[in-house]
Each structure stands twice: as structure tokens, then as C-alpha cells.
Amino acid sequence: MRAPADNEFTLKIANVNGTGSASANGLIMKALFRMGIPVVGKNYFPSNIQGLPTWYEIRVSERGHLARSGYIDLMVAMNAETYRKDLDCVEPGGFLVYDSTWPRSNLLARDDITIMGIPLAKLSNENFSGARARILMKNVVYAGAIAALLDLDLDIISELLNETFGQKAHLLDANQQAIRLGYEWTRENLQTPLPFVARPADKTADHIIIDGNTATGLGAVYAGATVGAWYPITPSTSLMDAFKRFCEQTRKDPDSGENNFSIIQAEDELAAIGMVLGASWAGARAFTPTSGPGISLMSEFLGYGYFAEIPAVVFNVQRCGPSTGMPTRTQQSDITTCAFASHGDTRHVLLFPANPEECFYSARQAFDLAERLQTPVIVLSDLDIGMNDWMCHELQWDETYRPDRGKVLRAAEVEKLEVFHRYVDADHDGIAPRTLPGDHPKGAYFTRGSGHNMYGGYTESAEEYQQVVDRLLVKWDTAKRLVPRPAVQYSEKTRLGLVSIGSCDEACKEALQQLAAQGLSMNYMRIKAFPFSAEVQSFLDAHDKLYVVEQNRDAQLKSLLYLECEVAADSLTAVLHYNGLPLPAGFITDAVMQDLAKGVAA
Amino acid sequence: MSFMKKPAARHPRLPVNDIGLTVRDYEGGMSTLCAGCGHDSITGAIIDAAWQLSIPPHRFAKLSGIGCSSKTPAYFLGESHGFNSTHGRMPSVATGANSANRELNYIGVSGDGDSLSIGMGQFAHAIRRNMNMTYLIENNGVYGLTKGQFSAAADLGSKAKKGEVNMQPAIDPCTVALTMGATFVARSFSGDKQQLVPMLKAAFRHRGFAVVDIISPCVTFNDHEGSTKSYKYAREHFVPAVAADFVPPAARIKAEYDEGTVLPVKLHDGGVVYLRKLDEDYDPTDRIEAVHTLMRHGRDGEITTGILYVDESQPDMHELSNTTRTPLVDVPYSKLNPGREMLQKIQTRYR
């Protein structure tokens, strides 16, 4: 039975969106991080501008577990509308803070937890003027109260406020005062600190707190992307915001002030991917960020890119489907759609980063693969990775990196050719050199989504058509050798394992520890790309029973493994989490234990 | 798209342009469109205009959507890159290509189905961006490849080949373009090369989005009695409002023009288009007037032609977004990579 301990607990703040709670929550999280304790923040927000319930969950774990914990030890219940539910989800023995400015019904009580009233609104109203300021400062007051309850380092909080509001003295003063109000009232009126507190540690050196969309946008800048086309869609929007911000910071020509980048807000996703194909065809590194509904709209052009062999990078920050689904909840439910997006025999290279750090590096990898393979590459992140605050290693940059532009013949090389034909596979790797518009008259070719032969000419010939689509399979085999290998933890001692993907990683690693603690040691493979490389097949071959953990209803990764690999019919068991919340480790552990118990009973 | 190579033989004494090329150097493959198709005349006009301007053929990029019109880029400028995209989506591909390489001459070829039905959204938004390209609509009022359905450009009450009457109002691409903010709007007739060639030259040289709507009869499905897009109807109902004489930057002006009826429009590269008003009351620099005239003539079943509107003063897509003058494809990676030190600096925010 778990119990909260110092540096091992979860707190959750229930609030109303549009009240400015994000900065107070971020302050608490950042203070814990600066104290040297690993933290992760998960934001459960509505698809709405103002007035609906929103939650922020901070898991503190010196042991470094960064998945959603699945339990709440301290609840800050600021939203009367959700109070009943918020009360219910506190673990027995846990604590709840509410705003005691107004009386609360006795019915809203639990005798197995400690309920603490703090007059947050009253403290704010008495000390600040103006409706907006009072609402904002009420949030900072609870940050002060939490600091008292969890014994947060006030100097660090003060330092963080200085960094945020240093230039704006009146805001800085107000925030410092609000922290003090909450802190002092709580110290004087309640028993502090709680039985579990934050203790300074040394586990966050060389780490940062960043979300995946920011890291991806930054990665695209470093990868040398110059053209970004997009249509705003939750939860991918902040990716282009980040790309733009970093471009403004680093891509202005120092002499002319002109932009060494071009960002186009398209009229829709159909146009956004068209722009990416046009820019890539012309020779730029181009990308578009989107989410599920955008992928549906882009499918026609994705098939074009596959067949006409044009590089493109798409970042799909997945959200809950089907249809509009739940735009502000997470899922991994676009795996099969992305693998085969578009009509006809179409297949796409996919990358599956597991966290913001990998998002940064997978941007570079995606562009290199797209240009090397001359085909669209879709990077499948998700809302949990893209929009939540993750602790990860500092991002590193290898100054020797040079973009792999693939087989591109520029003017000087075209000049030396007798004749140029677009789709002749001289190297037998399925990839033919391309030329860029405007470079050389001999390099001209006609790009078409209609049937074409190896010379780039239109064809309706059975043989010529088949020659081209068969060569695309040769290229697919080349892709298997180029995509990143899976991350594998393997021991010969067991024939049992977990297989997973993307943002399931943290929960899987924690579940493996939980299972080991119960005497069950298992191997683990996290798949990083599609098509599946030979290593994926080897791992499958080395196991009798594998649990495939993923965040969708229909076991999409498992289906893809059955489709593309040699797997015995009953060797894969699905572990599926798809309610829109990030996956907690306990879910996997329970599923595995229950399944194994079933096997024993049978 | 059907395509046949043309024989390489050429007449030894063909005239050459300023860069020493003959008109044959601007041709493409053999057309596989129906004999007498208006589109082939437009292809010829594009070849003539490009040759006369002495632009190296490989400095063009030609893009199209889907349909009979969109096949034609295979028939001109064989030495330039072509992109036959998906149905109605050429404007987005052109936008991307243009943002990557601003120095090429972009020709988009579309049709009335491609631009006014499936591609209406992309057509409208490409205009709004004022990207530097020439956008041709080879307009025959009918779907040819699927054998004769009305397009959105078919006039109210016009008849299909088998007698069906169109009951929906037509979309006029010129009126749409004007109201969307196009900076160059023209209309011509595939059968009038004298009007079309100088118009295309001006469009190619215009900085910004040049829409050229070209009525181009479909000899197979829309050239009958009752059609308003037939050769006969076009010849009888065309009202030329403005004639254009294009003067390239280097040439001296030989012709004498009457002030008042002639309007010189300076192009960004130093060239001049002299617009000769054929309708005295028409002012091709007045957007509202242009819309008014088009709608009035349209109501009376007449088709206004010529360079209907031009505004050289508007910033194009790149000026609007302050993009570097060096084409982005030519900016070296060393200038794009912010480097390790900057990465450290950026990350201080996240510690």
C-alpha cells in the first residue's frame, strides 16, 4: 500500500479556466524543480476560453517517476462547481484545501481526509483592488498557502517572481505580497507543514522543464526548416507559436533585419500540406504541425507526396478522436490512419517521440529521413507530450550536424549529365535523385500524381506503372534500415515483455518496477518508428507473451505489428487506455497482473 | 496526363529573342487535347509571351490542378519544372514553392471546375496573399474529362449539349478576384491571340497575384447553340474595355499615345504597360468601378475583356512577411542554425 512521503506525492489544483491560474501553478511546479526535486505537470483543460473547469496536477517524485500518478494526496479545490468530484478523488489520508471565504455545506465532507479552509478570496479582496487583480491574486495566494503546507523554499519563489516580473515593479510587488498573505495565514492558522513535504534534493541538475511542442518547434529551427505552413488546431498550435518565437529570436538577418524563414497561416489543412509539398519540391525544408482532423484533411496530399516522392514533415500532436473528439484530451489513436493515410497503396514513415527531449531530436531526424527517402514523414506526438510540462535532460546540439538533403542534384551536377530522368533507381535503394526548379534546363521534370514511368513521363502502361510502385517497396525496405531502432531492455531470463510507444514510456518504465517489486521481471521494447526495423521482429521472436500498451481503443499498434511482422496469433495481448487522460503506471501493472492471474486460474 | 514528345527538328532561320532562343525552346510536348480546343491556343500564347520576354525557360515553374486545362503545362516550357497537383489545390503548392524560391516566374494553370468549385477556397486565399504569380483560368464552363457536366462558371440559363438548362448563377472569377483584393485582373478569349499575348506578358511581369480568366471554348462539350462559352457566343458578346501594349524595360517607346485615353502602368522591373481605353468611361485603376462594369455587362449577357484592373503598388507575399531577398532555398544552413551557444541561452528560460 502506498502512502505519500516527502518528495513522493501528487497535488492537484482545481480551478476555472480564464482566471490566470496557469502562472500560479507554473510557479509551484518551477519552485519544486528548482529545489532539485523531479516534477511533472499535467494540465487538464477544457476546449473553452473562460469559465469551465480546469485542473493542474503536479507529481513530485524524487525517484524520477514522470507519468501521471493516478492518485491525489493534496487537492486545492478552487472550483465550487467541481468540488464534489474533487473531494471524491483525494486518497484516504490525504488533504484538501478549499476557499473558506464562503461557507461550505457539511454534506461536502469526508472523515477519512483532512479538509482545510483558507479564506483565499477574502485575503485577496482585502489587499488588492480591481476585479481582475483580485481574481488573479487569489491564485497567487493559494500558491503561498501551498508553499506553507509543503514547506517550499520561499527564496526560490521570490527569485522566480523576480525573473517573471522583474521589469514590472507593481506586478512584482503584488505577487510577492500575495505569496506572503497565503503563506503567513496558513502558517498562523493551520497545522503546517503537512506530513509529506518537499525537501531540497539534487536530482534536477542538467535538466529543464519544457513541453513537447516548444521542443519540437525549437528542433525544427535547428534542423534548418525555413518554411512552416499551418492551420491552427488544438493541441498543435503552440508548436508553430514556438517555431515563430525562436525564428524571431535567431533567424533575423543581422544586417538586413529580414527573415530567414517563412511562416504561412493557411486557409485550412489541405492548403497547409500543399504548401509544404510545394516548398519541399522547390528545395526548402518545410513542415506543418497539426492534429487528427488535420491529418484526415491532408490525406489526399500525403498520398501525392508518397507517389510523386516529395519530402514533407508533418507533426501530428494527437488528441482524442474520433471526429472532433475531445480536442483537449490526449490519445494515440492516429497510428493506423497515419501509417496508411490516403487512398491506394500508400504507406508513410512515422516517428514516435516519447517526451519533449525526443521531440527536439526527432524534428531533425524527420527532416533527414524525409529528404533522404523523398517522402512524407509524420512525427506522432500527442497532447500529453506536446502541451504538458515535462522534466527532461537539457537539449544538446552537435555542431558537426549537417542536414542530410538526400539525393539532390544541383546545377553543377545536372550540367555534367547527358540527360536527367526523375525516377531512375541507379543505386537500387529505391531512391532516385531529384532536381530543384530554376536550377538548370536539363534538370526539368514534370511532377505528377497520375501514373508515371521511371522517366517521369505520363503512363497508363501496366508494366511501367507497376515498375514504379514496386520500386516504392524497395524504398520502403531502405526506410526500415534508416529509421530509429526501438529502445529495448532485454534479459534472456524471461520470455515475457511489454511493447509500447510514445508517451506510454514513463508509465511503462514505472510499471516494470512495480511488477518487479511483485516478483515479475519483464522485458521492454519501445517502438520509435514505422516501418518496423529488423530489431522489432527480433524482439517479437524472443518472447512468448507480450503486452502491447497503447492509448487507443482499437489496439492500433498491436494491429500494425500483426500486419507487418511475423507474430504468433495469440502472443500479443492489448493493454489499452483511451479515456483521454495520460496513462498511469498502475493501470498497466493491474492489467498485466490480472491477465496473468487469469492464465493461472485457467 | 497524356504527353508526347515533339520532334527536335527546327527551322534553321527561326528568329531568336534577346537571350538567343527560338520560340521552339519555349515549347513543350505535343498536346493530346481535342482538335480545336481553346486551351491549345492559350498554350501557344504562353509560349509566345515567355519567348518575347526573353525569360530563360528554366526560370519558370508551371503548376496546375486537375482537368483538361491542368494538362496543358506539359505542352509548354519543356525546360521548366512542372507540378501537376491535386484537384483544386494548385494555389497552395504554388504558395509553398514561391515561399521557398521567390525568384522564379510562377505560372499556374487552372480551369473553371478546378478554381471555382473544388478549388474556390484556395483560389480566394491565394489572391489574398498576393503572391507573385500568374494564375490562368482556362474557362469553358464545362467538365470535359467527365463528359459535359456544368461547371460553376456556366451562365444561368445556358444549355448543355444534351439540352439541360443550368439553373444556378455563374461564378465570375474576375468579379471574385476583384472583391478578394487581386492586384491584377484580366479577361481574354483563347481565340484572340492579339489581345492575349501582351496581356500575358503584363501578367508575367506584374508583381503580385495576376488573375487571367480566359474564355476557352470546349469544342466537344460546350460549343453548341445555347452555350455562352462557345466560339460564336464569345465573338458576338465580347466587350473589350482596355487594350494592353506591353513595353519591356529595355525597349524604347516608339508608339505615340494620346494622353487621357492611354494609361501607362509602371511595373516593378521597370517595364511599362500602356493600357489603351476602348471604353472611354472605364478606369482600370478603380476596383469598385471595375466590379460595377463587370456586373453590369454580365447582366446584359456581355463579357468585358482586357486588363480590367491593375495595381502595382501593393506589397506581395514576401514583402508582407519581410522574407529575405535571397531565395530561402539558397540560404546556407550555417545561417539557419542558431548554434550550440544559443541553445544554451534559450534554455535558461526552462530551468
Image: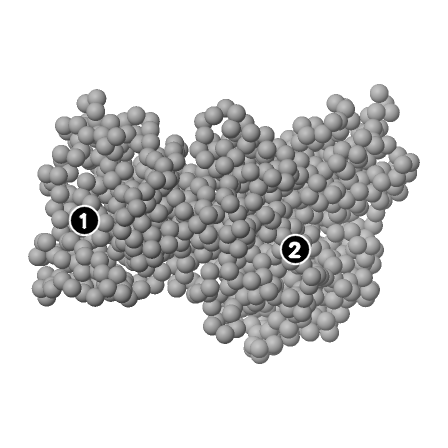
* Front residue (pair A16, A492): A492
Quarter of the picture holding the C terminus of chain B = bottom right
**In this view of the protein, which residue sits in the foreground, A252 or A169?**
A252
Residue A541 is drawn in which quadrant?
top right
Question: Helix, strand or loop at disc 2?
Answer: helix
Which quarter of the figure has residue A78? bottom right
The residue marked by circle 2 belongs to what chain?
Answer: A
Q: Which of marks 2 and 1 is in front?
A: 1
Answer above or below: position of A467 versus B132: above
Q: Name the residue under label 1.
A: B195
**Label 1 environment density (alpha carbons within 10 Å; few <14, some 14–19, many ≥20):** many
Q: Where is residue A177 in the image (x, y as percent from the top left)?
A: 63, 74
Question: Which residue does the image show at 78% across and 26% down from the upper left?
Answer: A571
Task: Name the residue tied to disc 2.
Answer: A360
At 83% from the left and 32% from the top, the residue drawn is A542
* Label 2 in the same subunit as label 1: no
Left or right relative to A442: residue A539: right
Residue A257 in view (yes/no) = yes
- In this view, A294 is above or below A167: above
Q: Is residue B160 left or right of residue B351?
A: left
Could you give the CA–CA distance between mark 2 and mark 1, rounded to whole angstroms?
55 Å
Identify residue type, mark 1: Gln
Q: Which amino acid does label 2 sit on?
A: Phe
Q: Position of residue B287 (x, y in %)?
A: 21, 57
